[in-house]
Amino acid sequence: MKVTSSLAIALAFGATIVAAQQGGPPDTPAVTVRGQVFTPRTILARNMGTEEDQTTAFTPHKIVGNVYYVGMRTLSSFLIVTPAGNILINSTYERNVPAIKKSVEQLGFKFEDIRILLGTHAHGDHQEGDAVVKQLTGAQVVAMAEDVPALQNMRPGGKDHPIDRQIKHGDTVTLGGTTLTAHLTPGHTRGATTWTMQAQEGGKPYNVVFASSLRAPNTLTPAIVAEFEGTFKAFRALPCDVPLGDHPAQYDMQARHSYIGKEGVLNPFIAGHACGEEADVQEAMFRAQLAQHPGGATAR
Ligand SMILES: [Zn+2]
Ligand SMILES: [Zn+2]
């Protein structure tokens, strides 16, 4: 009896140590948004999926106008096609670059026609592949100034992170008649960038929002709290008809994709009503974490 219970305690204790060593987010606080319960741990799991999800291409597809999806099941890459060459948003992990190239080619475009490489934020799951994309295409790599230090520390295989143009909030990137505007939406990283553009479809303009992650880190410092307070407000004010995000779960990509071609559905990605949904989840969690640690301390 005694042995059994000590063993159970030891096992439980061991599991706690493993969880802490892995550095995953905690399973508290829990928030309910539109009937769905989220914790920091389930949000991260939703975003990342399995290792296989992070490295397996999702069916490449047209989103709206000249905007296409060329990413993995759980890591977004977007291709914007123009007569003067193409723009790629997010290279994801370096090991995914061949799969992104294949998706671009499956859509009938050339990977080498990528002229400009943009990113949403300086984490490896979104921008680790920048150096290889630069090598393969010669694209101009654009980076938000506040994310430059973190990008410079991203050196897969010892390669320097390429940065050809540093931008600030409100700057634009134009190629072949398409202009993207950079919005600094910090909190998740210092230079987290949400990109916006207008796409034309059926003779109508649509405001496309390529959102950076709005997920709060486990540790909320006063500086990060101030960043998020500004970010949620600014993000919600962006004109938006087509909500996208750097993890597909942020805009229900797989569910929306399944509606393509269904009777009565014009374009499932044109969903202005859904533009604030991801911000609702992330802001609810941010406020719950703040309530748990009002001084802006660690949630771990
Ligand atoms: Zn991130
Ligand atoms: Zn991410």
Image: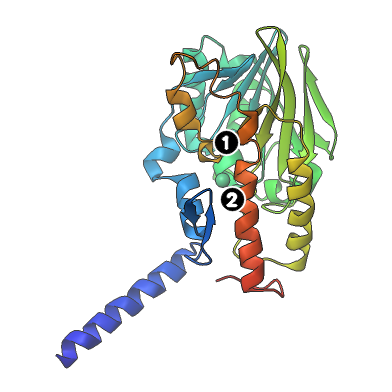
User: Residue 290, percent across and down?
Assistant: 67, 67
> Which residue extends farthest left?
1
Instruction: Kindly identify the residue that appears in the image at 60 percent across and 44 percent down.
Output: 278
Which badge, 1 or 2, comes first in the chain's sequence? 1
User: Residue 203, percent across and down?
Assistant: 70, 7
Quadrant containing the C terminus in the rendered view: bottom right
Examine the rendered structure and indicate whether residue 187 appears above or below residue 130. Answer: below
Quadrant containing the N terminus in the rendered view: bottom left
> Which of 47 and 39 lies nearest the eye of the viewer?
39
Q: Is residue 134 left or right of residue 225?
A: left
For disc 2, the marked residue is: 281
> Which of 165 and 169 lies nearest the eye of the viewer?
169
Q: Secondary structure at mark 2?
A: helix
User: Alpha-carbon neighbours of circle 2 within 10 Å: few (<14), some, or many (≥20)?
Assistant: many
* Mark in front: 1 vs 2: 2
Q: Is residue 94 left or right of residue 6?
A: right
> Which residue extends farthest bottom?
2
Q: Is residue 134 visible?
A: no
User: Residue 270, percent across and down?
Assistant: 61, 23
Dot 2 amino acid type = Val
Indicate which disc residue 268 carries: none
Dot 1 amino acid type = Gly
Q: Is mark 2 within 8 Å of ligand 2?
A: no
Instruction: Kindly identify the residue that appears in the image at 85 percent across and 35 percent down.
Output: 170
Q: Is residue 212 visible?
A: yes
> Which of 223 and 144 lies nearest the eye of the viewer?
223
User: Residue 135, percent across and down?
Assistant: 62, 27
Spatial CA span between label 1 and label 2: 29 Å
For disc 1, the marked residue is: 129
Q: Secondary structure at mark 1?
A: loop
Instruction: Kindly identify the residue that appears in the image at 40 percent across and 74 percent down.
Output: 17
Instruction: Kindly identify the residue that appears in the image at 35 percent across and 79 percent down.
Output: 13
